[in-house]
Image: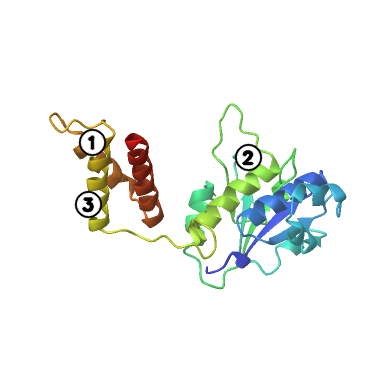
Amino acid sequence: MKSLEQIRFILVGTTHPGNIGAAARAMKTMGITQLHLVEPKIYPSAEATARASGADDVLHNAVVHNSLAEALAGCHYSFAMSARLRHLPMPIMNPREAVTKFEGFAEDTQIAIVFGREHSGLSNEELDQCQYLINIPANPDYSSLNLAAAVQVIAYEIKMSFQPTIHVGRVGETRETITNDDLSHLYEHFEQSLKEIGFLDPANPKNLMRRIRRLFNRADLDRNELQIMHGILRAAETKARK
């Protein structure tokens, strides 16, 4: 597989419209946009839109079907989500195992993740239309996840498989690295400043400078941070002279 667009989330018989909106929000946060609804009790709905919290495009493009068979049209594989481990002749796996299986599929594979009703899940007839069963290994003493939470769990696992990179910083922001010479100059400045403010006794330095070196070696300073440290030291020196 090569695209999140090849994965559709199918919600079957959803009773509360707010759960549809919350599921759409959970999907969009992980970059999944293909939402299909099978006989939702109330849809469209202002409550669904409110709970979507900005994932209006996922809701707007949702496809409503009269049956699960119709919603599965065009899919090569379907995975049913279930909180109950049923005695059915179908492979059962957790979300991470399921996503690992996705990775072995051909590039043009279309996959459906099927979620059941809030209180009763999927019927046996609906499960029979799926090839695999996904179970979230929650607390056995309290394993009830709401619909949006279940959607978020599997959506997160899919996202981590397809696009695990964490994007840090603002657009266009670059981090300028420093050299060993820059660090050496900083340590010299530290030693000079600490002597001037009376924190470092030249006659009895102990291991102070060695510990400072270790501290800043771990810190992995960039150019801006280096300049901040020099500025703090200069300010301390000026204060000490006054």
Mark 3: which secondary structure? Answer: helix
In the rendered image of this protein, does residue 205 appear above or below residue 221?
Answer: above
User: The residue under label 1 is which amino acid type?
Assistant: Lys
Residue closer to the observer: 99 or 75: 99
In the rendered image of this protein, does residue 120 appear above or below residue 179?
Answer: above
User: The residue under label 3 is which amino acid type?
Assistant: Ser
On the picture, is 153 further left or further right than 129?
A: left
**Residue 89 visible in the picture:** no
Which residue is located at x 34 percent, y 48 percent? 230
Q: CA distance from mark 2 to mark 3?
A: 59 Å
Q: Position of residue 152 (x, y in %)?
A: 62, 47
Residue tagged by mark 2?
Answer: 83
User: The residue under label 2 is which amino acid type?
Assistant: Ala
- Whether residues under marks 2 and 3 lie with C-beta atoms below 8 angstroms apart, the answer is no
Of tags 1 and 2, the one toward the viewer is 1
Label 2 packing within 10 angstroms: few (<14), some (14-19), many (20+) = some
Which residue is located at x 54 percent, y 59 percent? 170
Q: Position of residue 213 (x, y in %)?
A: 24, 43
Mark 2: which secondary structure? Answer: loop
Q: Quadrant of the C terminus?
A: top left
Which residue is located at x 23 percent, y 36 percent? 195
Q: Of callouts 1 and 3, which one flags the residue occurring earlier in the amino acid sequence?
A: 3
Q: Position of residue 7 (x, y in %)?
A: 62, 62
Residue tagged by mark 1?
Answer: 195
Q: CA distance from mark 1 to mark 2?
A: 66 Å
Which residue is located at x 56 percent, y 35 percent? 138
